[in-house]
């Protein structure tokens, strides 16, 4: 519980009001009792002055809140307990619930470009330019920042978010699966990775908790050498935490006596969702390889047709037209294969990783529930020992049993609070993830359909154009050449007849 005192000047005014002309204040009623307060004219003028102040923005309202003055005294993982209703019943609220701030566009982050860099005596690497524009004045000293970041800097940021917010669904980074289809420093690969990194930062910015994370602020505002110093003091913890969670997940699932139906259903859906995306990604990869093999084998067809056309007199132009159409068709297939595979595989893998991140948060929540259940059992045991008549007959044992019960009871209440806060965080993040998944995958389907329509339209135009030329007597010299040869053969036959 956090007890907030009034500001000192207000406290002084209410305890020892200065002398002066008294002004009647309205009654303040509470329950069945009513009291009349008298304030001076100076104080009433001051109150009027406060009411006439222009409105401030939401961020300034948060800073002026009394809770901001005791922020340093509150642990980072503390959750506020506030009374709710007229009966004063305490309700535990997570940061997602206690942050009642209107959504404003006070932070804009973009990954605008990429560049291949190769410092002396170092392997080449790709860097991405991150541009930040903000109107926040607390965590940001400037209004605009521009820094180049490497992919490992993004990895560090995500690790720190996982450590600091284990019950939140952390957005995924673009994976390295595209290396199977494109070269490491090719334009297509770097462009797709840039888009994925941009989406990663956009999801953090839109999150009501992650957007204020200190590691995220450092990532946006610190120069490269300062960021490396910060990374040196925190690298490696995220991987260790993830590994520990994966190892303990199986045993936690087996030992959980009463899994929460709500979150058990979510976990079951996420596991099924991940399997479906994995299968679809495998089929997409297979389609890519088959189309790639087809285009490689089809490349020999146009040169063979052109070589044949060089030996023909009457079919030279039609054969060349066929070879040209085939080359255009192969080019369309290759373009379809690269663009569809690039967007399809990257998006499927991204949401597969997003689902795995949600599963990690749910498993961590189950771990908290297991700890809570064990502490509840332990508290029941301590209660039985405390209430045992034999223990009550011995004052020393009774005192010891009470201390042990109180200690376990305190730990149990803290564990209950953690589980409740984790539940609230996951409900909010899971709902947001469902909406993000729906829009992202629908956009993927629209893009997939659009690219196939464009491909088939190109192929249709190619073959329709060839058909028109083949059926048009003026397009090629087929009939003209054929008529000339016919006339020449007739002349030869007439000459031979006359000679005979």
Image (cartoon, grey):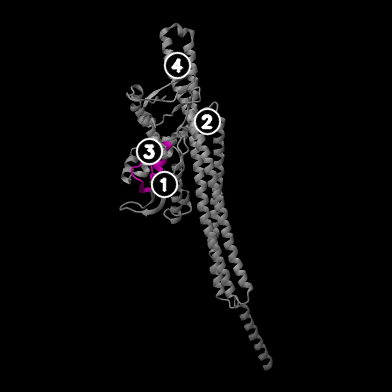
Mark 4 burial class by Cα count in 10 Å: few <14, some 14-19, many 20+? many
- In the picture, the disc for residue 405 is 4
Regarding mark 3 in the picture, which secondary structure is present there?
Answer: helix
Cα separation between marks 1 and 4: 51 Å
Question: Residue shown at 54%/38% (left/top)?
Answer: 270
- Reading the chain from its start, which is encountered first: label 2 or label 1? 1
- Reading the chain from its start, which is encountered first: label 2 or label 3? 3
Q: Position of residue 412 (x, y in %)?
A: 46, 22
Cα separation between marks 4 and 2: 28 Å
Q: Which residue is mark 2?
A: 253
Viewer-nearest of labels 2 and 1?
1
Q: Quadrant of residue 302?
A: bottom right
Return the residue found at the far front.
21
**The magenta stretch spans which residues?**
134-163
Q: Position of residue 263 (x, y in %)?
A: 54, 33
Taking 18 as reference, is 318 above or below it? below
Cα separation between marks 4 and 3: 38 Å
Q: Which residue is mark 1?
A: 109
Regarding mark 4 in the picture, which secondary structure is present there?
Answer: helix
Quadrant of image for the N terminus? top left
* Closest to the observer, 368 or 90: 90
């Amino acid at each position: 519980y956090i007890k907030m005192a009034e500001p000192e000047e207000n406290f002084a005014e209410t305890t020892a009001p200065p002398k002066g002309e008294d002004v009647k204040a309205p009654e303040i009623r509470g329950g069945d009792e009513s009291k009349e307060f008298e304030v001076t004219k100076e104080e009433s003028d001051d109150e009027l002055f406060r009411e006439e102040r222009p409105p401030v923005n939401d961020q300034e309202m948060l800073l002026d809140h009394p809770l901001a003055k005791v922020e340093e005294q509150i642990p980072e993982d503390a959750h506020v307990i506030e009374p709710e209703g007229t009966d004063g019943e305490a309700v535990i609220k997570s940061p997602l619930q206690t942050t009642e701030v209107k959504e404003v566009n006070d932070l804009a982050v973009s990954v605008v470009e990429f560049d291949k860099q190769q410092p002396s005596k170092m392997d080449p690497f790709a860097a991405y330019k991150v541009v930040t524009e903000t109107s926040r004045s607390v965590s940001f000293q400037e209004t605009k920042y521009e820094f180049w970041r490497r992919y490992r800097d993004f990895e560090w940021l995500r690790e720190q978010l996982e450590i600091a917010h284990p019950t939140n669904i952390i957005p995924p980074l673009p994976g390295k699966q595209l290396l199977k289809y494109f070269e490491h420093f090719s334009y297509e690969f770097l462009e797709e990775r840039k888009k994925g990194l941009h989406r990663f930062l956009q999801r953090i910015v839109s999150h009501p908790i992650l957007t204020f994370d200190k590691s995220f602020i450092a990532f946006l505002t610190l120069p490269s050498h300062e960021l490396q110093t910060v990374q040196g003091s925190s690298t490696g913890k995220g991987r260790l935490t993830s590994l520990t969670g994966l190892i303990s997940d199986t045993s936690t699932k087996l030992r959980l006596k009463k899994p929460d139906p709500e979150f058990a259903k979510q976990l079951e859906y996420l596991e099924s969702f991940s399997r479906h995306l994995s299968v679809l990604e495998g089929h997409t990869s297979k389609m890519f390889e088959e189309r790639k093999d087809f285009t490689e084998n089809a490349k020999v067809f146009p040169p063979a047709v052109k070589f044949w056309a060089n030996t023909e007199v009457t079919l030279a132009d039609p054969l060349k037209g066929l070879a040209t159409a085939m080359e255009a068709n192969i080019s369309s297939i290759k373009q379809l294969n690269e663009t569809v595979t690039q967007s399809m595989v990257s998006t499927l893998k991204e949401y597969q990783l997003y689902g795995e991140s949600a599963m990690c948060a749910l498993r961590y929540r189950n771990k908290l529930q297991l700890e809570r259940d064990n502490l509840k059992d332990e508290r029941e045991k301590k209660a039985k020992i405390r209430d045992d008549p034999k223990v009550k007959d011995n004052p020393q044992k009774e005192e010891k049993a009470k201390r042990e019960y109180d200690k376990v009871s305190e730990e149990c209440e803290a564990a209950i609070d953690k589980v409740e806060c984790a539940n609230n965080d996951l409900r909010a993040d899971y709902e947001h993830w469902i909406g993000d998944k729906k829009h992202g995958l629908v956009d993927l389907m629209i893009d997939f359909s659009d690219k196939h329509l464009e491909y088939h339209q190109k192929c249709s135009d190619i073959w329709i154009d060839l058909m028109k030329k083949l059926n048009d007597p003026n397009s090629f010299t087929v009939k003209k050449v054929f008529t000339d040869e016919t006339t020449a053969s007739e002349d030869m036959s007439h000459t031979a007849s006359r000679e005979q």
